[in-house]
Image: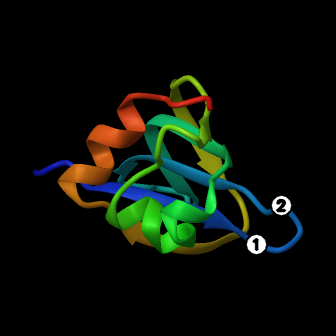
Amino acid sequence: MATRNVVVTTDKDRRGVFGGELLPSKNGKTVLRNARMAVYWSSDVHGVLGLAANGPSHTCRITPMVPRIEFDGVSAVMDMTDEAVEAWAKEPWG
């Protein structure tokens, strides 16, 4: 099975944006492997969809990776392009 790299946004009460590899879930929760959080993204990224399409730029703030994270309250799951996956892996912290 191919790896599905995604950007996940959480609901309005949690307001987080994360990138990583989507894993199958047995309990109905969204689970990411090798996950990072977008703490800040600059206007040149063009919003959350830009994080999925192009990835973060050097002026964004992306955290170090954690091996696994489970979510409650997900509002969206967006597939990443290969370009975006590479940019997230750089973990920019401008």
Image height of 69 relative to 15, above or below: above
Q: Which residue is mark 1?
A: 11
Q: Quadrant for the C terminus, please.
A: top right
Residue 10 drawn at (x, y percent): 69, 65
Q: 4 left or right of 74?
A: left
* Residue closer to the observer: 91 or 66: 91
Residue at point 55% right, 68% down? 48
Q: Residue furthest left?
A: 1
Residue 70 drawn at (x, y percent): 61, 46
* Residue closer to the observer: 17 or 40: 40
**How many neighbours does mark 1 have within 10 angstroms: few (below 14), some (14-19), or many (20 or more)?**
some
Q: Tell whether label 1 touches label 2 (CB within 8 Å).
A: yes
Is label 1 in a helix, a strand or a loop? Answer: loop
Residue at point 19% right, 52% down? 82
Q: 26 left or right of 8?
A: left
Residue 24 drawn at (x, y percent): 36, 54
Residue 36 quadrant: top right
Residue 73 quadrant: bottom right
